[in-house]
Amino acid sequence: MTVITVEPASAGARLDRWLSERLSDLSRARLQALIRGGLVRVDGTISKAAHRLHGGERVEVEVPPAPDETLTPEPVPLSIVHEDDHVLVVDKPAGMVVHPGAGRSAGTLAAAILAHAPGTAGVGGPRRPGIVHRLDKDTSGLLVVAKTPRAYDDLVEQLAARTVTRRYLAVVHGRVRATEGVVDAPIGRHPTERVKMAIRPAGRGKRAVTRYRVLERFSDFTLMEVRLETGRTHQIRVHLASLGHPVVGDSVYGKPRARSPIPLDGYALHATALAFVHPAFRKMVECTAPIPERLERLLSHLREAAGA
């Protein structure tokens, strides 16, 4: 436990900024996480990051041990679409977290990859071996993994240059009128709900571009093909919700409308196609993943309802 008394000259300062100047060994993000977790108290009271100090308060900071950076391999079966000595492409099921994070340390795709290909341990970060991009926990589909440092660097460059093709299938609420379209709107952290992303004003978010094409319309739903030009966190979910057509099953950005008409494990969002230049052979690698059974059930239900 660290205890600091606020000096009178700091009256009016924000709690998080004041702490970051005095606990320089902790990042601003780490301090804000401690504050959100109730591990920072001002005169015995849990306070928010934006709390304004008055001077003379007693600030207590509890810093738990840093998480272990090692990752334990877990021999979980993988659906492998492509594999060679340089890259691995897997079809991730909905419900599986890509790498360890807050609240999830076991059962991750990262741990399964490490068990399948131990050589990825030194590629990328220690808790995300070889993983160059990610999918949300409740999104299924294709994800490429680098098995060597050279492949990792090359794939990261391809993603930055927007030369990796990523296509998704999405079932959204409502009948989308336009046959095709594009959403070009910057995405950044939500200004008040920090676990969410949002469309932000110019200069406050990173450019995000999503293209879509209608494949099939139902009475109250639409099946779409979606293509990413950029890869921002939650991009498809945020952009489609901004059109008034949230992804089915996405209660974060679509509530209260996003409930599925039938039980659905995860979001009605599936990464169905992935293409990139092989980092060693310089030939195009094109992979596809069939629509999962959970989405087939949803589409069958919608088609039967439309025909009734």
Image (cartoon, rainbow, N blue to C red):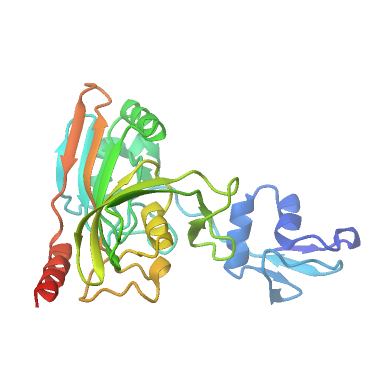
Task: Work out which quarter of the rendered image holds the N terminus and state it.
Answer: bottom right
Q: Residue at x 87, y 61 (%)?
A: 7
Residue 79 image offset from top left, x and y in percent: 15, 49
Answer with left or right where residue 104 lies relative to residue 47: left
Quadrant for residue 46, please give it.
bottom right
Q: Residue furthest right?
A: 8
Residue 281 image offset from top left, x and y in percent: 21, 21
Q: Residue at x 67, y 68 (%)?
A: 48
Residue 256 image offset from top left, x and y in percent: 39, 76
Q: Residue furthest top?
A: 281
Q: Nearer the viewer, residue 60 or 13?
A: 13
Task: Work out which quarter of the rendered image holds the C terminus and state it.
Answer: bottom left
Residue 9 against residue 149 in the figure, above or below: below
In this rendering, does residue 251 appear at all? yes
In this rendering, does residue 127 appear at all? no
Q: Nearer the viewer, residue 296 or 3?
A: 296
Q: Residue at x 32, y 57 (%)?
A: 97
Answer with left or right where residue 21 lies relative to residue 170: right
Residue 152 image offset from top left, x and y in percent: 34, 32
- The number of numbered discs placed on residues in the rendered structure image is 0
Q: Nearer the viewer, residue 279 or 86?
A: 279
